[in-house]
Image: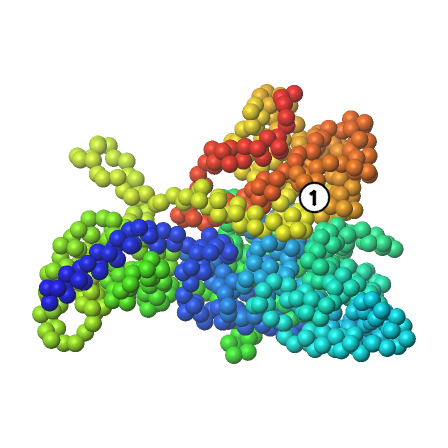
Amino acid sequence: MTTAVATDRLLLSRAREVLRRAGNPFRNYFARNPDDEICSRFHVPELFGHEREQLLRVVDLYRYHASTHSEIIPVLGNKGAGKTHLLHSIKHGSDGAWQLLVTPGTYQRDNDFLEYLLFQIIDTLLGGAKQKGRRPLEFISEDLGRKLLHQALGQATREEQLDLFPAPGLGRWTRLLGMGTSQAQERTQWLMDSLSRPGSYASGYAPLRRICAECDLAGERACELVCRYVERTESHATAGHMRRHILQGFARAALLGDESELANFLTYGFAELDFKVQPSRQDLVLSLFKVLMEILLKLRIPVVVAFDQLEDLLLVRRNEEGHRMAEAFFAGIVQVMHQIDGICFLVFAERGLWNRFVPSLDGYIQDRLNNPIHVPGHGTIKALRLEAPPAELVRMVVEARLRPALEELPDFNDLPPLFPFSQEQVQRIARTEPTLRDMLQQYRHLFDHVIYGEAQAASVQSFDVARGQESAVRGQEPGGRRQEAASLVRTVPATTPLPPEVKSLVVVETASPPAAPAAAPATPAMPNLSEMWEQQIMAARNQLSPEGALTGATRELQSGLGAFLQACHEHGVKVGPWRLQHVVAEWTFGEHPTYGVLTIGHWVCRDGQPWKVGIGLFLGRGPGKPKDLEIKLSALELSPPVVDHLILLRPADDLALTGKSKSLWQDADKRGRHGRLEAVSLDEFSVLYGFPRWLAAVGEALPNGQPLPNLADLIQDRCEKLLEQVCMPACP
C-alpha cells in the first residue's frame, strides 16, 4: 500500500505542477461580449439549456412564418448571471439553424432609431465577424446565389444555355448548323440538379463557385445570366429598383467574390436612385429596410437583434439622464416594431434595471414590451429569467474549466474529477453565491489558495495520513486509483477554510485611533485594461478587414469617433496645448442617411477662443466618393456656422483627390473654408470601431457601484497618432 500511496502523491504533485504552469483557469471568469472566445472554451451545453431551447424556438417562429410581427423577449438576470454567455451560445453554438444575429455594440441615442438599426444590420452583414463559423455575407450570398442561378437557368432560352458553355474551336460552327447542342443542355440540367439539392457549407469556401467550376461554367457568364434574369423579373417601382441592386450585389458576391457593388449600394447607391419625387431621409431608410427584410425572410433567415449588457449600452450607470435614455431606447424599439415585421428583439438586461425603468414608461410602450409570445411546445413566453444554476450544473462548469489543463497528463483519468477541489468545496460555493460570476470569482480565489498558497504544503504533508485513514475504512474493498486519489483530496482541502473576500466595506471614523493597525482589506481586482483593449481592437480589425466592410461600418465608425472624443473630454486628455471643451458625439444634417453626419469637438488652446471642429468619416468609394465629399463640405456652408474647421478621415490607400472630388475641394478652399484630409490606416479605424465596445467591457468588468478609472494615460499611450489626426494642428 505504501507504493500506491507514493504513486498517488506523485500523480497529485504532477497535477499541481501542470495547473501551476497553466495558470488559474478561473481568472477570465466572465464573457466580455457575445463574441468572446472564452465562451467556446468553457461552454457547458446543459447550462441554461432550457432557456436556450426556448429562445431558439422563438427564432424559428420568424424562420417559418415570415409574416410574424416583430416582438421583444427580455432575458433578465443579475449582473454575472450568464446572460452574455447564453447569447454567445445562440450566436455561435451548434444548436439551431443559422440566423442573422445583430449584436449592437453602441447606442446612438440622438439618431432616428430606425436609421440606427438599419446600419447596425448593414454593418453586421458586410463585416468580417463570423456567426456559427460563417460570415453573414458569405452565408446569405451563397444561399441566395443558388436560388437565383437555379431560377435563371430554368427560364433561360436555348441560345442563353449555349452561351453559358461556348464550344471550343470548330464546335462553334457546328452549333450554327444546329448540331452539338446536347452537351450544353446536359450540363445545364446537371447544374440545375446540383443547385436544387440542399447546399452544404461544411466542405470549404464558395461552394457555388465550385459547382460552376465542375461543369466548366465561368463565374462571369453565370453572373451575367443572373443579372439579366433579375432585370427582367423585378418591377420598376422604388422597392423593385432597390431589390434589383441588392440581388445583383449578392449574386456578384457569390459568383465572383466581389462585395463592393453590394456595399456601395447599401451605403450610398440606395439614396441616389432616379426618383420621380425625391423621398425624405426617413422614407429612404424605411424603404431599404423593408426590402432587405423581405429578401432575408424569403430565404428563411430570421433577423435577430440582441441588445446585450443594456445597462452599459445605455450608460445608465454613469449618466444621470439614464431614465431619459432608456425611454428613448424602448420607444425606438416600439417604433420599429410598428413599422417593420419579422424582427425578433432580444434584450439582455439586469433585472433591477428592467424593473426600475419599464414600469415608468408610457402605457403603449409597456404594452408592447410586455406582450407575450406563444411558442408551440413551450407555451406562452413573456420574459426569461436566469437564476443561479443548481450545484450539479456548477460542478460541470468547474470541471470544464479544470479539465483542459489536466488532460495533458497521461494518467489524467486517475485524478479526482474536481481536482484540486473537493466536492464539498464546490457545493458549498454553489449553494451560497448568488450568481455564476460570483461563484467563479470564489473558485478563482480558492484555486490560488490551494495551488499557490500555504494550503499546498499543508495538503501534501497530510496526504499520507489521509491515505491511511481511507485505506483503514475501505480495507480490502475493490476500487481504482481514481477513488483513492479522490479520498486524499477530499479529506484535507475540505477542512481548509475558503479564502476571505471583502464584498463591501464601510469606513467608520472614530475620535481615537485604533489600538493596533488592522490588516488592509482585500480590494476588488481591477480589470486588465490593456488585455481587454487588445481583445477588442483585434476583434474590430477582423470585422473591418473584408472588402466593403469599412464602407458598411461608416455609421458605426462615426459613433465610435463620438464615443472616443467624449471619453477624451471626460477624462481630461490633452493633445499638446489643446484640450476639448465640448463634444457633440453625432450631429446629423441633410437628407443623406449615410454621409450626413459629423462629430463636433470644441478644441481650446490655452486661453484662446474654441475652434468648432467637425470630424467626419470620408469613406465613399467610386461614384460615392465625390458625393460623400460634397455632403461633408456642405456642413461648412450652414448659417449660422456650425463648424469652423473640417477634418475628414480617409483610408490611407485612397487619399488622392481626382476629378470632381478634387474640384469640390479646391472650390471650398477658394471660398476660404478650412479643412484637411487625414490618411487613416486600418489600425486607427479599428480603434474607433472597438473603442465603445472596450468601454462597455470595462464597465461590465467593474464591481457594482465602482466608477470608471481615469483612462487618460491609456488613451494617450494607445491613440497618440489618432489624437493628432482629430485635433487642430497648431495653436491659433
Give the residue at x 28% y 39%: 508
Q: Looking at the picture, tell me which residue is in the foreground, 405 or 214.
A: 214
Q: Looking at the picture, tell me which residue is in the foreground, 141 or 200.
A: 200
Position in image of residue 650 (x %, y %): 68, 39
Position in image of residue 204 (x %, y %): 58, 64
Location of residue 352 (image quadrant): bottom left
Q: Which part of the image, by quadrant, shows the N terminus?
A: bottom left
Tell me if residue 625 comes above or below residue 491 in the rendering.
Answer: above
Colour setup of the view: rainbow
Q: Secondary structure at mark 1?
A: loop
Tell me if residue 656 comes above or below residue 171 in the rendering.
Answer: above
Q: Is residue 233 visible?
A: no
Q: Which part of the image, by quadrant, shows the C terminus?
A: top right
Q: Is 495 left or right of 122, judged from the image as shown?
A: left
Q: Is 121 left or right of 459, judged from the image as shown?
A: right
Callout 1 crowding tier (Cα within 10 Å): few <14, some 14–19, many ≥20: many
- Residue type beneath disc 1: Leu
Q: Looking at the picture, tell me which residue is in the foreground, 4 or 547.
A: 4
Give the residue at x 67% y 40%: 653
Q: Label 1 belongs to which residue?
A: 619
Give the residue at x 79% y 46%: 623
Position in image of residue 456 (x %, y %): 20, 52
Give the residue at x 56% y 70%: 97
Q: Looking at the picture, tell me which residue is in the foreground, 518 or 82.
A: 82
Position in image of residue 331 (x %, y %): 62, 56
Location of residue 71 (image quadrant): bottom right
| Residue projecting furthest to the front | 170
